């Protein structure tokens, strides 16, 4: 039997970005880091010597952050479903897991806001139906949160739950009262709101989901790169702390940006999620929403907690009632 230091790194409560870098460099067990020096580790995983030293000290001093088994089981049991079984499976089987940060990215009109609204409603599903029975914070940076659309998706959810259990306590007024809405007009407001979110969460302990739609919108302006990076790092770190401390899920909606150059030459362009590595390192899972032949697909292209997962794409649809499975599967043609 392996001892505690031989446990899989992915089973520990280490930052998702660090897990991914360690795994890619061949460090899968704690014992793999036993002889690593800060300098060699920093070169292997592409971080500063100071960050590498911090990782080694955590392990040697047995000060890795931890969570009780009861807490871990509760987070996985009461995940937030998307109402698309395919996407839920990509995210681990039951949907968006509490205590983690998940990113959905894609071009405008692909369904990011619809997904955020659906999750804000589904987080309220009662525990006797294996939901988190929580509340949601919705941070709207683009003005895309339309109350009429929220009502449509809420009514669709009520109808779905009524098919499952008779006398569901869900009603439209209750659903709307459990979504706390913040309209943000610039990155300064966003940073201030996240920085002071602890106070709000302490006053509203039932909150189990924070949606930011979108995280990139106010960083597209002509900000100095160093300022943008510093602010994003602070926001990402704070969101990680909030997700872990309050056992809630953070869902980030992200835009796409054009990347020039690459292996195909300087004139080649590709679409890539905005904000680069600063954001990606904080996310446990990153899902690309895309369209092909007028059909919608979700593609899991990064999973720090499931590094051995065979990455696949699944089809989904958006109807009046919200996010749903497609009646007929379709091949995305990968």
Image (cartoon, rainbow, N blue to C red):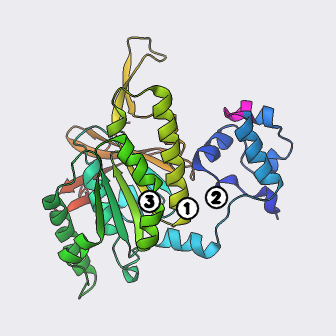
Q: Which segment did they paint magenta?
A: 42-48
> Of residues 76 and 332, which is closer to you in this image?
76
Residue annotated with mark 2: 13
Q: Identify the residue at image location x=37%, y=19%.
A: 269
Name the residue carrying label 1.
244
- Identified at 26% across, 58% down, the residue is 323
From the viewer's perspective, is 305 left or right of 27?
A: left
Mark 2 to mark 3: distance in Å?
Answer: 22 Å
Q: At numbered mark 1, what does the secondary structure look like: helix, strand or loop? A: helix
Instruction: Say which of marks 2 and 3 sits in front.
Output: 3
Q: Is residue 146 left or right of residue 17?
A: left
Q: Above or below — where is 145 with respect to 222?
A: below
Observer-nearest residue: 18 or 159? Answer: 18
Of labels 2 and 1, earlier in sequence is 2
Q: Which residue is mark 3?
A: 197
Q: Secondary structure at mark 2?
A: loop
Label 3, secondary structure: give it: helix
């Amino acid at each position: 039997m392996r001892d505690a230091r031989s446990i899989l790194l992915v089973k520990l409560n280490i930052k998702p970005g660090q897990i991914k870098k360690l795994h890619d460099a061949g460090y899968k067990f704690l014992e793999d880091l036993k002889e690593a020096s800060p300098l060699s580790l920093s070169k292997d995983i592409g971080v500063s010597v100071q960050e590498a030293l911090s990782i080694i000290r955590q392990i040697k001093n047995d000060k890795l952050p931890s969570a009780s088994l009861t807490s871990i089981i509760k987070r996985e049991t009461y995940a937030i479903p998307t109402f698309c079984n395919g996407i839920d499976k990509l995210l681990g089987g039951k949907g968006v897991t509490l205590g983690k940060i998940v990113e959905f990215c894609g071009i405008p009109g692909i369904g990011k806001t619809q997904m955020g609204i659906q999750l804000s409603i589904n987080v309220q599903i009662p525990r006797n139906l294996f939901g988190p029975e929580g509340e949601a914070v919705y941070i709207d940076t683009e003005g895309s949160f339309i109350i009429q659309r929220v009502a449509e998706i809420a009514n669709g959810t009520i109808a779905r739950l009524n098919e499952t259990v008779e006398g569901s306590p869900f009603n439209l007024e209750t659903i709307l009262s459990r979504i706390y809405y913040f309209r943000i007009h610039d990155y300064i407001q966003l940073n201030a709101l996240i920085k002071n979110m602890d106070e709000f969460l302490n006053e509203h302990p039932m909150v189990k989901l924070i949606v930011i739609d979108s995280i990139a919108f106010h960083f597209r302006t002509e900000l100095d790169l160093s300022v943008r990076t510093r602010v994003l790092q602070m926001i990402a770190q704070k969101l990680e702390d909030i997700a872990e401390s309050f056992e809630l899920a953070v869902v980030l909606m992200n835009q796409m940006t054009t990347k020039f150059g690459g292996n195909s030459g300087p004139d080649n362009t590709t679409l890539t999620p905005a904000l680069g590595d600063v954001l990606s390192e904080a996310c446990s899972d990153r899902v690309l929403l895309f369209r092909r032949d007028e059909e919608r697909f979700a593609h899991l292209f990064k999973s720090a907690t499931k590094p051995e997962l065979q990455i696949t794409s699944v089809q989904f649809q958006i109807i009046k009632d919200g996010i749903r499975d497609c009646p007929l599967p379709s091949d995305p043609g990968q």
